[in-house]
Amino acid sequence: MVRRGRRPRFLAKDRLFAIPLVGMALRGAGQIPVSRGTGDQKPLRQAEEALAAGEVVLVYPEGTVTNRVDSLPMGGKTGTVRLSLASGVPIIPMASWGSQPVWQKSGKGSLKFGRPIWTKIGPPLDFLNRVDQASDLQSLRSMTRELMTALTDIVEDLRSRYPKRWAIDG
């Protein structure tokens, strides 16, 4: 994406923007701050504007790093689906496996050299024929479950093929 002049923009928790050098880097890279748990719609509007301008927006539909012991995706929030319906852009599900020992909320972690981190992209999820359901919370939750199932399928496939030498507990 970067080589094509399309730098990805992430939705990131606003507390990261308060960290001196991290915040400056995030703002400089055009990342979008999210005040989690407030219901603030500004981040979704900014993401919509970015998509309308042809930019790439990456969203973690869970709103955080998974805390499941098996490292599978948790339940998602409806923002990703709402953004897709509002922008007219399908969702491209993408997941990775192998970074859990490196990127985690707590614990020792592992920066062991050579650890592979695999990424896989699934087929687009196009909910645009359901745009009339954009204000129905139950429908949004149903579409979000479909998204999370697609992501879980991708993660389970990556996990099943991951080299045993680098096996991750879970």
Image (spheres, rainbow, N blue to C red):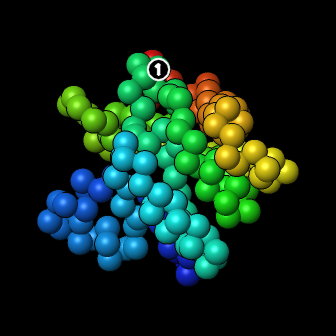
Q: In this view, does 160 lie above or below 81?
A: above
**Foreground of the two, 25 or 142:** 142
Q: Residue at x 67, y 64 (%)?
A: 87
Residue 80, how many percent across, how many down? 59, 49
Is residue 42 visible from the viewing direction of this image?
yes
Q: Is residue 146 above or below residue 12?
A: above
Q: Which residue is drawn at 56% across and 73% down?
A: 49
Q: Is residue 23 left or right of residue 36?
A: left
Residue projecting furthest to the front: 135
**Foreground of the two, 128 or 118:** 128
**Which residue is the site of mark 1?**
70
Residue 22, how many percent across, how many down? 23, 63
Quarter of the image where one finds residue 102: top left
Q: Is residue 91 above or below residue 111?
A: below
Q: Type of residue at label 1?
A: Asp
Q: Which residue is drawn at 61% across and 56% down?
A: 83
Label 1 crowd bin: few (<14), some (14–19), many (20+), radius 10 Å? few
Q: Is residue 77 above or below residue 6?
A: above
Residue 159, how many percent across, how many down? 57, 28
Q: Which residue is drawn at 45% across and 61% down?
A: 43
Residue projecting furthest to the left: 20
Q: What element carries label 1?
A: loop
Q: Which quarter of the rendered picture does the C terminus lie within? A: top left
Q: In this view, does 51 lie to the left or right of 40?
A: right
Residue projecting furthest to the right: 129
Q: Is residue 4 left or right of residue 31?
A: right
Is residue 126 visible from the viewing direction of this image?
no
Residue 89, how many percent across, how many down? 71, 61
